Amino acid sequence: MVESLPDLIRRWQAGWGTARSFRPAEEVRGGLHVLLGQPDRHREVIALSPDSVRALAGEVAAAAQPTWLTVPTNEPEAVEKIARDAGLEVRDEREALMTIPLRGHPHRPAPPPYTCATTMKGAVLETVLRHPDSGVAARGTMAVVGTDAVADRIETVPEHRRRGLGSVVMSALAETAAAHGATTGILVATADGQQLYSALGWTTRATVLIAQTPAG
């Protein structure tokens, strides 16, 4: 069964919010509104459909505090024009909403001398790879919400990059999430991350544009 994009966006946001301990989103005016309370990101609005983008862009442009507009879409050029016409600053780098059936996720063991450990606190998994000499080398989290597992903050320490450690982290998270009943992996990837996840079998479902209220 192919999920609708709005449904996939809702599921991603629910897991992402859980992974970061955000307050639950409020779904109004065709978007998911999340109060973050951060100095440079007071609120984030995630558009659910093309029909809501224009109104949400105007709402974000008029916000008194720094606000982001995140739009997963299959029409990125049209969305970017709407955001710029509303006066928003659009990030140059586009991201990607990606999914994978967890049963097909490849297994990647930790290469010696690295060790891998995965723990779970509430609904959130955390995998940490350590090197015996330099400590934490890579880490990542994944929130299990129903049958979805949403990956977040997959990071490798600079001096340990290009050794496949990101694949090890994703493998451990996916296997543990599947053991806890998750069947579908979901994430939003940066341009660099897309290369890693595509090589592991993740499929791009939409381009993600991010715009924000103008500085000042």
Image (tube, helix red, strand yellow):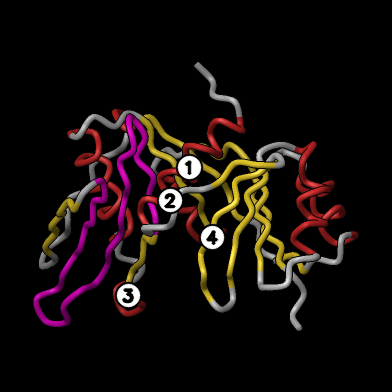
The secondary structure that most of the magenta stretch takes on is strand
Residue span colored magenta: 123-152
Q: Which residue is mark 4?
A: 35
The answer to if 141 sits in the magenta stretch is: yes
* In front: label 3 or label 4: 4
Q: Which residue is mark 2?
A: 16
At 78% from the left and 57% from the top, the residue drawn is 59
User: Along the line of sight, which residue is nearer the eye, 18 or 107?
Assistant: 18
* In front: label 3 or label 1: 1
* In front: label 2 or label 3: 2
Residue 175 is drawn in which quadrant?
Answer: top left
At 33% from the left and 29% from the top, the residue drawn is 147
Identify the secondary structure beneath mark 3.
Answer: loop
The answer to if 49 sits in the magenta stretch is: no
Q: Where is residue 112 drawn, in percent x and y?
A: 11, 63
Closer to the N terminus: mark 3 or mark 4? 4
CA distance separating discs 2 and 3: 22 Å
- Looking at the image, residue 181 lies above or below residue 140: above
Q: Which residue is mark 3?
A: 157
At 32% from the left and 28% from the top, the residue drawn is 183
Q: Which residue is mark 1?
A: 12
Q: Amino acid at mark 1?
A: Trp
Closer to the N terminus: mark 3 or mark 1? 1
* In front: label 4 or label 1: 4
